[in-house]
Image (tube, rainbow, N blue to C red):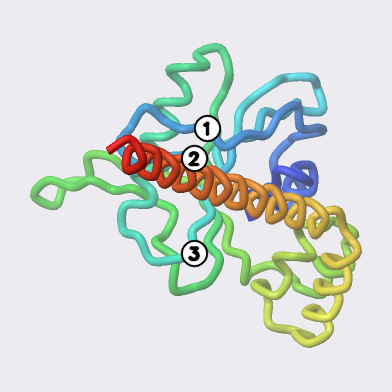
């Protein structure tokens, strides 16, 4: 999904339900934290012209710390962008991944903190509408939405993906990786050849 959103970030705005008229930038930045990178960071502009940032965490497994991680990410991004509002959103892919949308802290039964986190649950959306929306990101996500007309959605998604620039992008990525591996193999073979020739030369001298 990260790669698909990099190609079609504007499609995601329909799903988020935020006042965003256009996407200025989309990135997958590394955070200055151990083993933590953001899934997606959108820089958007509202209909009235205000710029702000949206952190999106795609949650495809059960993780009790997801809400806290999102809050930490929001804090780090805010420190780097103090003049921009930062909104964090977790997108749950299936019901078993759902860890809620509230962070509550209690001491001796007394509620100290109660924070609501913006959460999107894909299975609550209409799959047929998503498949017919014309937005590639929503079409791709439609099989994870409300289980209606599943076979139709699967076929539509497959057809759209095969005709989209995502396939070309992925193929270019695979080709680049293959060429890199081939180059590494050539370098290894060349190093082996030189080592062999050096050994032969030393043997002739002796």
Pointer 1 or 3: first along the chain: 1
Q: Is residue 112 above or below residue 49?
A: below
Q: Position of residue 38 (x, y in %)?
A: 49, 40
Picture residue at 62% right of the left edge, 34% below the top:
27
Q: Nearer the viewer, mark 1 or mark 3?
A: 1
Q: Is residue 89 visible?
A: no
Quadrant of the drawing holding the C terminus: top left
Image quarter of residue 156:
bottom right
In space, the residues marked 1 and 3 are separated at their CA atoms by 20 Å
Q: Position of residue 113 (x, y in %)?
A: 28, 40
Q: Are marks 1 and 3 in contact (CB under 8 Å)?
A: no
In space, the residues marked 2 and 3 are separated at their CA atoms by 14 Å
Mark 3 lies on residue: 60
Image quarter of residue 195:
top left
Q: Secondary structure at mark 1?
A: loop
Q: Is residue 137 above or below residue 19?
A: below
């Amino acid at each position: 999904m990260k790669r698909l959103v990099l190609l079609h970030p504007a499609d995601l705005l329909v799903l988020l339900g935020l006042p965003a008229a256009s996407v200025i930038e989309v990135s997958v930045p590394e955070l200055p934290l151990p083993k933590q990178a953001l899934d997606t960071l959108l820089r958007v502009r509202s209909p009235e012209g205000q710029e702000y940032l949206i952190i999106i965490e795609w949650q495809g497994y059960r993780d009790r710390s997801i809400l806290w991680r999102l809050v930490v990410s929001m804090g780090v991004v805010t420190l780097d962008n103090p003049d921009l509002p930062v909104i964090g959103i977790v997108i749950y892919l299936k019901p078993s991944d759902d860890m809620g949308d509230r962070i509550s802290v209690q001491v001796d039964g007394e509620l100290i903190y109660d924070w609501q986190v913006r959460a999107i649950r894909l299975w609550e959306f209409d799959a047929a509408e998503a498949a017919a929306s014309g937005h590639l990101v929503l079409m791709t996500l439609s099989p994870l939405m409300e289980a209606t007309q599943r076979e139709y959605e699967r076929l539509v998604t497959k057809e759209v993906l095969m005709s989209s620039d995502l396939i070309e992008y992925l193929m270019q990525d695979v080709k680049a990786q293959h060429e890199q591996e081939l180059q590494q193999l050539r370098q290894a073979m060349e190093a082996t050849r030189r080592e062999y020739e050096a050994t032969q030369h030393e043997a002739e001298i002796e």
